[in-house]
Image: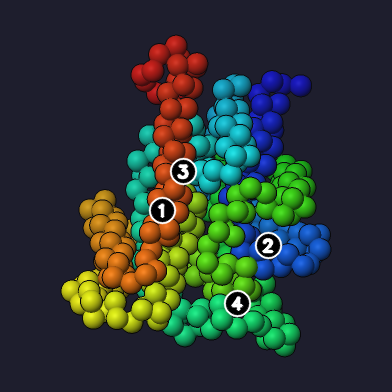
Amino acid sequence: MDLTFIIMWTGFILAGYAVVGNDSIQTLGTFLSSNEDRPWYVLWAFAGSILAATLIYGWMEYTGDVSYGRLEKYPFVADMTWPYLLPPLVLMVLTRTGIPVSTSFLVLTFFKPAGLLDMTMKSILGYALAFCVAILVWQIVTRTLDKRFIENGISESSKRNWTILQWCSTGFLWGQWLIQDFANIYVYLPRTITGLEMTVSLSILLLMLGIIFYAKGGKIQKIVKSKTNTTDIRSATIVDFIYGIVLLFFKEFSNVPMSTTWVFLGLLAGREIAIRYKLELHREPSDVERAPLAHYAGIALNGLLLLLIAYVVYLRDDINNLVIIVMAAAMIARAAVVYFETIPGHLNLKQAFWDIGKDLGKITFGLVISIVLVYVMRFITTGSFGGEL
């Protein structure tokens, strides 16, 4: 048996397990948290059927390319050697520690280091856009729904209705996520795969997904559970739907791969700040009177964020790095104003900002590891740190 063939499929299996184990919790984490009373194999059958349908559709629609065109600029490496197994191995180690690193950076950067800048900028845009959408949406949702969710339980009849809605939103989100992240797994296989290769690879992914569901998400799941009220099926449904909408935008935005991890954490960060902000103002309405400048600055920034979101959606393929930087700066400014507005009260957002900072530190650590691994691989394969792979 050809050594390249062995390395190719070994890399696929390792990448599949690492990506599913690390990234799937972004889409299925709230689903697992709010359905802990259901047998794991029921949840697995649901998610597995969507995985199979998405993969088969991509294979048929894109003439054998299950990455939905996201690997067009990543030529297949015909003479793959053992260093290509390093990214998924490192990813598996980091996943076991519960660190939510970006699989796009760790895996795809190895195959095309020159694409790191474009991938990084698109991922920063993903984080900022998801954060801005979340902090605006959940200011409204918390006022009308989340506060009620936290203070009141859910009746059996309402639970049945919300369960149907959540399974629909999870299915939509799961499909959008798979379209983005198939590239991270199938980068090890030829860009056009045969029916047999598609069947074998699908069976492997379904098996790995079953292992993840049996383990109830593993250590990455703790990040989801640490956020406010994510175990409530009503809140989980809204999280999944908004995340799916953001990923749908990026699916249509361009074929440049991106870090869905950054988008997910941006969404959770904006949501967490908005919920704590509105709950604080409910408990301490005097904060508005004691910090009026911050309050009115926040209202103005809300308007600015709406305009920026509309501008980004309008520009689509014409978005440049300056727009991304402006949006990231507006995101930071809005978060800072929220913090200063709630300082007068007894319940501020220090813990939320601390947790968000730790999450950002973890994904930044993953980016640094990706860059280091690229240079390590260059040295292993060429004997120097310069030049192309």
- Coordinates of residue 234 in the picture (x, y in percent): 60, 77
Neighbor class of circle 2 (other Cα within 10 Å; few <14, some 14-19, many 20+) is many
Circle on res. 362: 3
Q: Earlier in the sequence, mark 2 or mark 1?
A: 2
Whole-angstrom CA distance, mark 4 to mark 1, is 26 Å
353 and 388: which is toward the camera = 353
Whole-angstrom CA distance, mark 3 to mark 1, is 12 Å
Using the rendered view, name the quadrant where residue 352 is placed.
bottom left
Q: Earlier in the sequence, mark 4 or mark 3?
A: 4
Circle on res. 354: 1
Q: Amino acid at mark 3?
A: Lys
In the picture provided, is 99 more to the left or to the right than 256?
right
In the picture provided, is 130 more to the left or to the right than 329?
right
**Which residue is under mark 4?**
234
Residue 178 in sight in this render: no
Q: Secondary structure at mark 2?
A: helix
In the rendered image, the vertical position of residue 174 relative to residue 280, given as above or below: above
Q: Secondary structure at mark 1?
A: helix
Neighbor class of circle 1 (other Cα within 10 Å; few <14, some 14-19, many 20+) is few
- Coordinates of residue 383 in the picture (x, y in percent): 44, 11
Whole-angstrom CA distance, mark 4 to mark 2, is 13 Å
- Coordinates of residue 151 in the picture (x, y in percent): 56, 81
Neighbor class of circle 4 (other Cα within 10 Å; few <14, some 14-19, many 20+) is many
Residue drawn at x 71%, y 68% as measured from the top left:
35
Residue drawn at x 49%, y 58% as measured from the top left:
264
**Which residue is under mark 2?**
32
- Coordinates of residue 186 in the picture (x, y in percent): 61, 42
